[in-house]
Image (spheres, rainbow, N blue to C red):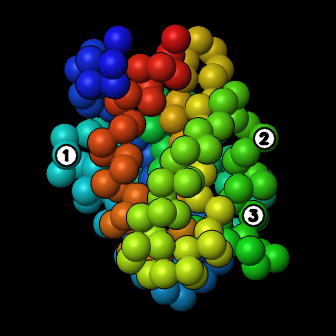
Amino acid sequence: MGAEEHKRKAPKKFKFAVITVSDTASRGEKKDKSGKFLVEELEKAGHERVLYKIVPDEKMAIIGAIVDAFNRGAEVVVTSGGTGIASRDVTIESVRPLFDKELTGFGEIFRLMSYEEIGTSAIMTRATAGIIRSSGRAMAVFCLPGSLGAAKTGVGIILNEAGHVLKHGRE
């Protein structure tokens, strides 16, 4: 069965959560343009939001938000922020151990598209994705950088592939 046939059999709609990881936004010192953009685009595509949350760049806050999303029925989670190489960028270290399967291709394609947009600075992101399985459910998690440009690039990939990822993640 080819990719197009798999996509035809994949879920068309899903419940989602957006989690913004930002010290400054969590303190109310800056607006969360990226997270709000992601929520708007996913809702515009007909998906149901179950959680939108801003957390600081802290491991337990990030993990807690992921668990909260799962408990609220999220099938897809998109994080925004904390994927760089600064010492406070801990999204990947917090989320990756939860993955049952990592989708390394997501990060590779995201970096390729980012390279076409911003050049070699694309090497600075550690964007990734994976599947978390628990209680007979699967939840796809996509970790994006916190810039609005990254949200715009990433949401296109997510909207094209999230249903396909869920289909296989549930198998």
Residue 14 visible in the current orientation: yes
Which residue occupies the extreme right position in the image?
Answer: 87
The mark total stands at 3
Q: Residue at x 62, y 72 (%)?
A: 123
Instruction: Give the Cα separation between the discs numbered 1 and 2.
Output: 30 Å
Residue 30 % position (x, y): 49, 86
Q: Which residue is mark 2?
A: 97
Q: What amino acid type is highlighted by mark number 3?
A: Val
The x, y position of residue 67, in whole percent, is 64, 38
Q: Are marks 1 and 3 in contact (CB under 8 Å)?
A: no
Tell which circle, 1 or 3, labels the residue nearer the N-terminal end.
1
Q: CA distance from mark 3 to mark 2?
A: 12 Å
Q: Which residue is mark 3?
A: 90
Crowding at dot 3, Cα within 10 Å, few <14 / some 14-19 / many 20+, comes out as: some
Q: Say whether residue 103 is left or right of residue 119.
A: right
Q: Residue furthest bottom?
A: 29
Q: Quadrant of residue 54?
A: bottom right
Q: Crowding at label 2, few (<14), some or many (≥20) Cα neighbours within 10 Å?
A: few
Task: Report x, y in % for residue 117.
Answer: 39, 77
Secondary element at tag 3: loop
Q: What x and y, as percent, mark residue 84? A: 67, 72
Tag 1: amino acid: Ala
Instruction: Tell me the amino acid under the disc marked 2.
Output: Pro
Mark identifier at residue 77:
none
Q: Dot 1: within a 10 Å radius of its alpha carbon, few (fewer than 14), some, or many (20 or more) residues?
A: few
Residue designated by label 1: 45
Up/down of 125 relative to 110, above or below: below
Disc with the residue nearer the chain's start (1 vs 2)? 1
Image quarter (top left, top right, bottom left or bottom right) of the N terminus: top left
For the point 49% across and 44% down, which residue is it?
77
Instruction: Identify the residue at image location x=81%, y=76%.
Output: 87
Describe the element under mark 2 as helix, strand or loop.
helix
